[in-house]
Image (cartoon, rainbow, N blue to C red):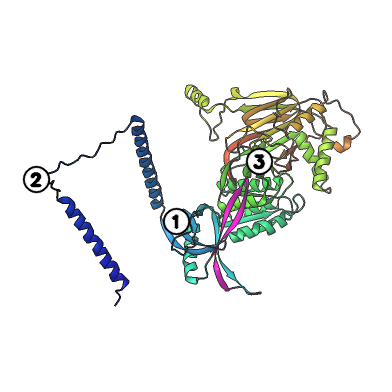
């Protein structure tokens, strides 16, 4: 009978082994010559191979390369070993079966290659390993198929991960579907994903939201309900929403609201509304700390971070801290817990606090906003253009006296402090009157900015030398000049040329500013048919009210205004934006 294949293979192996043994034994016996009986044949030495010097160097290089590859492989292996594997399983991703591995910091998946009839993988096909960083994941959900009207249950289809994707300056949400219909398998993975997401303590879990329904084209409510609220719900963020009904509503609510149950405050609107909410948040902090706002005081930091969803006509504050005017990007910064400390200015008169703010304009910027506010019945874009053209037509200088404390090199300041034994106050400013500088004359516009103020008309920013948290302000004083030269100066903001390279423009980096007007302000509407010589005639009126543009919100002051910058007084949801090469913001602040 025939032997079994296993037995035949054994016999064959045994036979091969016996043959090899016989050959080895035969080689051990030295052959004897017939001519020289009793004498053994001399053993022949193998010829030595000569190696040239270039070949020797080549061999050494090859050995070094092999050792380097071995070290690199060991390093990669060490990194893979250090990346602890938590779970491993099979899911279908984009209609491909994948080997999925959950590690400590990322989720990795590799497509499973089909086998060939011979048992191996297809030749020439590479395994493309893909991954997503777990720090970019903000939500995980069980994916189910439900019938119409069914609220709970349904057929399990798998797990869906939602993560943040950056495209240029925009942030968007993206979904990864892990398909597997096993309830037990998906439940284990889902529980591990939830534990990982709960470990990100810097992400907000509860937010207080204020929506201004009257901002810009009255789109704020729609933007929030259709684009922002679904993302907050997806990220399991609880929200308490207030739709404001009048100007100052958010300020009043923040004075009385219990903020301890929230992780942040969100405002949906334009620059003016953002200023109101920031002012309310900071004012509430001073009230809780017992600060006397009717005196020169050192303010305390805001207790909660502020998120700004851009829904206005300019959105300079949002663009400066987020790099782009995009509501979904702003929402993703909030969800992911991206924080940026920002400097804030205080505006006071007669030792009484008037406002907190990020930037201010006096003169042309203030009068343009005051005129626009009187024509609120007009559409926002038409109102803005009308106010700019009308103010340019009646362009008039303001007679002012500017006193400011320049910002100096910190090393020089430290040396000076050591030599003179001066003491710094809590704001790191010197109380030495000799350091103050003063200029006076006729000015068309004066800007004081603690942030870059990025916008489409100023790709580099209205104050390009200012950063969000460097503890300084940019003082930009535009002296009296002709209307044509002033328009040239304004147009420079929209190009990459230096908008300050005019003889009538002066710029300073300062810590404190005192602005004292010497002329009153009159309503433009009462002077439509009056001609002025802008070279010599300041605007004089018996009414001592001076309009200020504070972050797009109108403020009136009747005397000297004292401005101080306070480093990192508030935290905003966003990132540091050094430059803005491509901005989509429509700026109308000048």
Q: Are marks 3 and 2 in contact (CB under 8 Å)?
A: no
Residue 253: percent from left, percent from top: 66, 54
Q: Nearer the viewer, residue 332 or 407?
A: 332
- Of badges 3 and 2, nearer the viewer stands 2
Can residue 135 be seen here? yes
Q: Earlier in the sequence, mark 3 or mark 1?
A: 1
Percent across and percent down for residue 12 are: 27, 65
Q: Residue at x 55, y 35 (%)?
A: 427
- Residue at x 71% of width, y 36% of height: 458
The residue carrying mark 3 is 357
Disc assigned to residue 37:
2
Q: Residues within 10 Å of mark 3 (few under 14, many from 20)?
A: many
**For residue 47, side relative to residue 154 (left or right):** left
Q: Sequence-wise, which precedes: disc 3 or disc 2?
A: 2
Question: Which disc is residue 103 wearing?
Answer: 1
- Left or right position of 144 against 122: right
How far apart marks 1 and 2 lie (CA) works out to 77 Å
Classify mark 2: helix, strand or loop.
loop
Give the mark, 1 or 2, whose residue is nearer the N terminus.
2
Residue 564 locus on image (x, y percent): 62, 34
Q: Using the rendered image of the protein, determine whether residue 133 is visible from the camera's viewpoint.
A: no
Q: Residue at x 64, y 41 (%)?
A: 320
Q: Give the residues in magenta.
A: 152-178
List x then y, in percent, for residue 252.
Answer: 67, 52
Q: Which SS does the magenta portion mostly show?
A: strand
Vertical placement of 44 versus 105: above or below? above
* Location of the C terminus (image quadrant): top right
Can you tell which of label 3 and label 1 is closer to the viewer?
1
What residue lies at 85% left-to-right and 32% top-to-bottom?
Answer: 394
Q: Extreme left residue here?
A: 38
**172 or 548, which is in the foreground?**
172
Q: Nearer the viewer, residue 274 or 564?
A: 274
């Amino acid at each position: 009978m025939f032997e079994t294949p296993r037995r035949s293979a054994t016999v064959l192996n045994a036979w091969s082994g016996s043959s090899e043994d016989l050959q080895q034994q035969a080689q051990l016996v030295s052959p004897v010559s017939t001519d020289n009986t009793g004498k053994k044949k001399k053993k022949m030495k193998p010829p030595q191979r000569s190696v040239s010097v270039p070949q020797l160097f080549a061999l050494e290089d090859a050995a070094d390369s092999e050792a380097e590859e071995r070290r690199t492989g060991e390093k990669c292996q060490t990194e893979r070993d250090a990346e602890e594997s938590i779970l491993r399983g099979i899911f279908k991703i984009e209609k491909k079966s994948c080997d999925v591995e959950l590690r400590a910091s990322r989720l990795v998946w590799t497509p499973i290659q089909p086998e060939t009839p011979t048992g191996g993988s297809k030749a020439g096909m590479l395994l493309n390993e893909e991954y997503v960083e777990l720090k970019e994941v903000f939500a995980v959900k069980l994916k189910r198929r439900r019938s119409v009207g069914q609220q709970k249950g349904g057929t399990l289809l798998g797990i869906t991960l939602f993560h943040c994707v950056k495209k240029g300056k925009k942030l968007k949400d993206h979904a990864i579907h892990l398909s597997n219909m096993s309830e037990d398998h998906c439940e284990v993975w889902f529980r591990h994903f939830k534990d990982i997401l709960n470990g990100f303590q810097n992400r907000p879990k509860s937010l207080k939201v204020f929506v201004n329904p009257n901002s810009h084209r009255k789109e704020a409510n729609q933007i929030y309900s259709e684009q922002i609220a679904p993302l907050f719900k997806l990220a399991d963020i609880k929200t308490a929403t207030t739709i404001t009904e009048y100007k100052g509503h958010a300020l009043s609510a923040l004075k009385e609201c219990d903020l301890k149950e929230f992780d942040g405050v969100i405002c949906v609107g334009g620059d003016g509304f953002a200023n109101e909410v920031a002012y309310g948040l900071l004012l509430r902090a001073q009230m809780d700390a017992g600060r006397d706002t009717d005196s020169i005081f050192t303010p305390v930091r805001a207790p909660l971070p502020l998120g700004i969803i851009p829904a206005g006509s300019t959105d300079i504050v949002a663009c400066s801290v987020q790099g782009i005017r995009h509501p979904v990007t702003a929402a993703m910064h909030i969800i992911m817990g991206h924080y940026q400390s920002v400097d804030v200015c205080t505006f006071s008169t007669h030792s009484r606090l008037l406002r907190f703010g990020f930037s201010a304009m006096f003169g042309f910027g203030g009068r343009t906003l005051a005129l626009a506010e009187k024509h609120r019945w007009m559409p926002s874009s038409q109102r803005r253009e009308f106010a700019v053209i009308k103010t340019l037509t009646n362009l008039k200088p303001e007679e002012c006296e500017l006193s400011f404390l320049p910002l100096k090199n910190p090393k020089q300041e430290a040396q000076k402090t050591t030599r003179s034994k001066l003491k710094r106050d809590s704001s790191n400013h010197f109380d030495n009157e000799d350091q103050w500088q003063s200029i006076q004359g006729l000015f068309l516009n004066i800007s004081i900015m603690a942030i870059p103020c990025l916008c489409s008309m100023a790709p580099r920013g209205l104050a390009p030398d200012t950063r969000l948290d460097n503890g300084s302000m940019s003082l930009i004083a535009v002296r009296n000049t002709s209307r044509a030269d002033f328009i040239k100066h304004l147009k420079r903001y929209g190009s990459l040329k230096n908008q300050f390279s005019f003889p009538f423009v002066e710029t300073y980096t300062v810590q404190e500013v005192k602005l004292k007007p010497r002329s009153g302000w009159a309503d433009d509407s009462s002077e439509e048919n009056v001609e002025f010589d802008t070279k010599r005639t300041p605007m004089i009126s018996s009414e001592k009210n001076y309009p200020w543009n504070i972050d797009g919100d109108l403020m009136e002051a009747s005397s000297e205004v004292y401005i101080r910058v306070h480093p990192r007084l508030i935290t905003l949801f966003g990132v540091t934006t050094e430059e803005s090469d491509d901005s989509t913001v429509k700026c109308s602040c000048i």
